[in-house]
Image (spheres, helix red, strand yellow):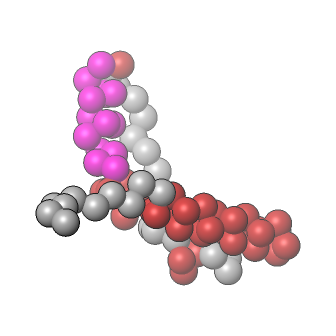
Amino acid sequence: MGYRLVLFPLTAFRAAMRAAEETLTDLFRAGHQRSSVARMMTRQELYDLLGYTGYEARDRAYFGGLPARDTDE
């Protein structure tokens, strides 16, 4: 048919919503997140994905000396 692009507009969102539902259900039932930690990104992985350190640097430049974030997991 000549198509060169296929869109899946809700695929990642639906997968994320399933993961959120399962995690929140586990959290509600157990009262803690220990059973979900293995499926979660680490804080560092999330920050790397978002380019978070760049936002921190921008905020420090704009707002001045903000306290450094806690990097402990």
The residue located at (46%, 63%) in the rendering is 11
Q: Which residue is outermost to the front?
A: 1
Q: Nearer the viewer, residue 2 or 40?
A: 2
Look at the image and tell me whether residue 33 can be seen.
no
Using residue 69 as the reference point, say whether residue 25 is left or right of it: right
Using residue 68 as the reference point, say whether residue 34 is left or right of it: right
The secondary structure that most of the magenta stretch takes on is: helix
The residue located at (58%, 75%) in the rendering is 37
Query: Toward which corner of the image does residue 56 lie, by quadrant?
Result: top left
The residue located at (29%, 48%) in the rendering is 51
Q: From the top left corner, tell me how far across and down residue 29 is, in percent.
A: 85, 73
Q: Nearer the viewer, residue 52 or 20?
A: 20
Look at the image and tell me whether residue 67 can be seen.
yes
The residue located at (62%, 68%) in the rendering is 18
Is 14 a magenta residue? Answer: no
Q: From the top left corner, tell me how far across and down residue 39 is, in percent.
A: 54, 77
Position of residue 32 relative to residue 44, above or below, is below
Q: Nearer the viewer, residue 19 or 15?
A: 15
Position of residue 55 relative to residue 28, above or below, is above
* Magenta-highlighted residues: 50-62
